[in-house]
Amino acid sequence: MKVSGIFWLLVLTIFVFPVYGQIIPDTVHIEEVEVLAKRKIEEAGLKITRPDSFQRASVLTADLSELISGYTPVFIKSYGRGSAATASFRGTAATHTQIYWNGMSLNSPMRGLADLSLIPVFFTDGVYLLHGGSSMTKGSGALGGSIHLENTPDWNTSFGLEGLAETGSFNSRKTFLKLALGGKNTQSSTRFFYETSENNFPFFNSGVIPNITDTLQNAGYNKTGILQEFYIRHFNENVSTLRLWYQYGNRDLPQLMSYQGSEREEYQKDGQFRAQYDWKRYTDGVNYHFFSGINTTRLDYFRATPAFEFVNEDSESKETGFLNHLRIFRQFDEKTYATVSFDANYFRVKAFDNITAGSFNESRLETSLMVNMHMNPSDRLALFILLRSETYDEKTVPFIPSAGFEWQLVKRLPLIIRANAARNYHKPTLNDLYWIPGGNPELLAEDGYTGDVSFSADFQGRTIGFSNELTGFISRIENWIAWQPAASGAYYWEAGNIRNVSSKGLEYQFTAKIKSGSFLFQSGGNYSYTRTSNLQAVHSADESRGKQLIYIPKHKGGVYGSINWQNFAFKFDLNGVGKRYTKSSNQESEFEQVLNPYFLGKFTAEKQIAWNEFLTGLKLTVDNVFDQKYHSILWRPMPGRFYSLTLALKYNHEK
Amino acid sequence: MKFIIQLAAVLLLLVACTDDPVETIYFDLDTSKGVFISCEGNFMYGNGSLSFYHTVNKKVSNQLFYARNNVPLGDVVQSVARLGNSLFIVVNNSGKIVVADANTMEFKGSITGLISPRYIHFVSGQKAYISDLYAGQLTVINPETFEITGFIPLGNYNSEQMVQVGKYVYVSDWSYGSNVLVVDTETDELIDNIEVSLQPKDLTVDKNGKIWVLSDGGYEGSPTGNEVPAISRIDPETLTIEQIYRFDQEDTPSNLELNSKGDTLYFLNRHLYKMHIGNRHLPDSAFMHAEQELFYHLAIDPQSNDIYIANAIDYTQDAIVFRFSQSGEVIDSFKVGINPSHFMFR
C-alpha cells in the first residue's frame, strides 16, 4: 500500500473506532522513592525540555532568551543586552527554530525567525521545548526544534495582583504588573510590562587605535506590552479563550567597535499585535482543540547620518498572518489513541523602502494535515507513528513520517529510554523566494532527517528529588538555504540551496533537590555538545568541508545551585559557551578572530516576607560576577559586571 | 577564590580556554614588486584585512595590519591606494580610512567621520578625493596631514570610482545612478555630468585618453529600472559617448581592467573576457572559462600583464587568488583574506 493510502486510512480510523476513557499511566511506585513518569500519551517518545517553575521564577523579569540560554541546552546567539537574540537547536540556524504561542506560530513569514529578546518571560505561564523531530507533533519547519509558550488560567483565583519593579545598572528600569480576576467559570488576566535602558555600559575598545576605555553609544532601548486573556468554562467540558497581545519596542542599534565614521542615528522599531480565539472541548474519549488567530508585525528600520543631513536607509515592513488550527485527540481503547490536526494559514507581507521607493508585496497560503497514532501496548511501553503533509505556494510536500517510542527498562526502576526518528522540512521564507534583488523563486525546501535517543531517570522522594536525562542526536539537513553573492557574478546577493549539513551531539540536563530541616537546596544544570558541519564543499580549494559551522559552539552548558532558609534565598548560576569560529574553514591564529569561550556567573540574594495572602520580596542580582570581557558576536561589546534590584509584591485571594 | 571558581567551571564544562595575548609582528616588507590586496571580510563582522603578494618571490603575507598593530582594520575593507610610502586603506563600513606605512604596516593615522567611503583618488601630494556611497559629496582631504579640508557637493548623485584625465576627475555615480560626473580639480567643483547606462561602476582610461565605463544595468525589480548592462566609451574632450557596447539582459559584467599598454580591456562576465579597444563589438567567446568556481575579482598587473583572478570560495573563508600568464597558464595561486575587493600593484 502506498504511503498516502496508509495516511488516509489513519485519518479515517480516528472517526470510526469506538471511544473509551483515556487512561494514561503516569506514576510508578517503588519502595523508597516515588518514580514519576508524568508524560501524557501524546508526549511519549518525544524529547522535551521544560524549565520548571523555580527556573522560570529566576528570570521572571528577563526575556525568553535568558530563560533558554540559562536553563536549556539550546544555544542563544545574542547581539547584546536588549538586542536581537535567536535560538539555535543542535547546530541549526535561527530560521530552523519555530516559536509557538499557545500553538500559534510567531516566526516571521518574511525572515523565518522570531526574536526571543522581544518575548518577556512574565507573559508566559509555561515554556517547553521540543527538540529535533519531536517538533513534528506541533508543526513542520523546526529542523532544530521548537519553543512553546503557554498561557493558562488559574481557576482558583478570585483576585490576584502582582507587581515587579526593577532598577539596574546603565539606567535600566523594568515594571511588570499582573491582575487576575475571576470566578468559578470565568477568568480574566491582564499583564503589562515596560522596560527601558540607556544601555550605555563601559567597555575596553580594542577595535581602534589607540585602544581606549569606551562607552557604548546609541544602544538604548525601551519595550512595552500588554497581554489580555479571557477564559470561559461553559457547557461543562468547553473552555473558550480570547487572548490579545500588543507589544512595541524601540531599539537603537549600536555600531561595531571599529566604527569611527560620522555619528549614526540607527534604530529599529518593532510593533506586534496578536489575537487568538481558542476553544477546547474535553469528553471521555475525544478532545477537541481549535484556534483561530491573527499575528501582525510591523518593523521600521532607519539609519541616518545627522552631520551630513543624509538618510541612508528608511524602510518598513508589515506582516500579517491568519492562523487556524483544529486538533482532535481520540482514544480508541486502553492502548490506542490518535491525534489528527489540520492547519490553514495565510500570510501577507509588504516591505517598502522610503528612499528608493522599492517595494515587495507577497502572500502565501499554507495548509498542513497531520495524523499521529499513539499506542500503549504495555504499562512500560508507548509508541507513536506520525505522518504530516503540507501545501504551500501551490506545492505539495509529500507525507513526511516520524516515529518514536518510550520504554521503561525495568519495572521497578525509574529508568526510561525514549527515541524518535523523523523527516522534516523547512519552507523557504518569503524573503528567500521573492526579495528584490536576490530572491530565488526556484528554491527548494530544506530537507531534514533527524533522530535522537534519550535515557532518563526521575526520582522524587519526600526530602530528595533528582531527575536527569542524557540524549544523543544525529541529523542531516539537505538544501540548506543561505544568501551569498550571486552565482551569476551580479553585485547583489541571492538565496540558494547551498549546503548539506550534518549535525550530531549530546545533551544532558539534571535537576536536584534536597530538603533538610528548614534548608532547601536546589541545583540544576545542562550541557550540550554539538558537532555540526557542512558536507557540501564547493571545490578542492574549499576548506570548510567537515568543519564546524560558524557561530555554533561545540560546547555549551550551565549549572546553578541555590539555598533557601527562612525566606532567604541565595542562588548562583554559571553559564559557559565554548569557542565559536567565524570562518567556515575554522582557521585559528591570533588574527583569525575566533570567539573565545566565556563563563558568566550570576549571583542573586532574595528575601521574601509572607503575610496572610500578601507576599513581598526583594532581590539583588549581580550579573557577570567575574567581570568577564567577552564577545558573543564579533566586535560587539558586552557589559562587564552589572547589578539590578527587584521589588516584588503579590496578593492572591482564592475562592 | 575567583580563580578557583573559574578553574572548576573549566573542568566541569570540559572546555579548553586560552586567551593568550596577541604578539605583535614587525614587518619590513619588500614592497618594490608586488600587489597589495584589500579583503572586504564579511559585512558587520569587522574582519576586513590587507594582504601583500610579492610577484617575484611569490610569497604572500596576510592580515598585515592586524599583525603589526594588534587592531583590526574594521568592517568591509573596500580599497587601497598608495601615496609615497603611505597606504590609504578605505574601510567602508567603519566610516574611515586607515593610513599605514607601506613597508612596516605601522599605523600612521586615520581619516575618520566619513559615512560610507569607497575609494580615494590622489589629485596631488596635498589633495585627495574620497568617494562615498551615501554622502552625496566627495570629501577632500590633505593626505599629508590626514585632515578633511573640504567637500564637493554632488547634489543627488553619489560617488564610486574615480579616474583623472587632465585637470578633471571623472566619478561614477553607481548606486541607482546613471551618470559620470565631472569634477574640476582646480576649483573642486562639480562642473558637468555625462548620462550613461544605468549604474555605472568601473572606470578606466585607455592609451588614447578615452574613458571606459562599465554599467551593470541595475536589477530586475529595481525602483530605478533595469537596463541591459553596457560598456561605454567617453571622449573626455567633448564629454560625449562615442560608443556603447551592450550586453544581453542576463549578463552580469563586472571588473573592467586594462592591460599595461592600455589597448586591451578585460572584464568578468561569469567567465573572463578580453577585448581590444578598437573592437566594434563585444567578444563572442570567453578568454578564460570559470568552471565550478566563481570569479569574484579581477586584476591585471600593469607591468607584466599577468592576470589575477580571485575566487571567494564560500565567502566566509580565505579566498584563493590565481595568477595566470597572458597565455592562460597558471603561474601561481595563493590564499588571501576573505572576499578580495581591490588589487593595488607596485
Image: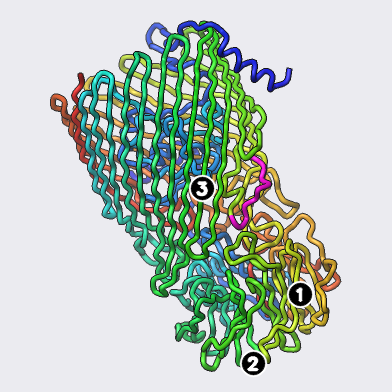
Label 3 crowd (10 A; few <14 / some 14-19 / many >=20): many
- From the viewer's side, name the closer residue of A337 and A244: A244
Determine which residue is flagged by label 3: A349
Say if labels 1 and 2 share a chain.
Answer: yes
At horizontal 30% and vertical 26% (from top left) the residue drawn is A521
Q: Please name the amino acid that badge 3 sits on.
A: Val
Work out how far the residue at label 3 is from the one at label 2, CA to CA, in angstroms: 52 Å
The quadrant in which the N terminus of chain B is found is top left
Mark 2 residue element: loop
Whether A604 is drawn above or below B179: the answer is above
Q: Main secondary structure of the magenta part?
A: loop
- The answer to whether residue B83 of the structure is visible from this angle is no
Identity of the residue furthest to the left in this view:
A611
Determine which residue is flagged by label 1: B245
- The stretch in magenta equals A436-445
- Label 3 chain ID: A
- Label 1 chain ID: B
Mark 1 residue element: strand
Q: Please name the amino acid that badge 2 sits on.
A: Gly
Q: Are marks 3 and 1 in contact (CB under 8 Å)?
A: no
Q: Please name the amino acid that badge 1 sits on.
A: Tyr
Determine which residue is flagged by label 2: B166
- Rendered location of residue A361, percent (x, y): 54, 51
- The answer to whether residue A90 of the structure is visible from this angle is yes
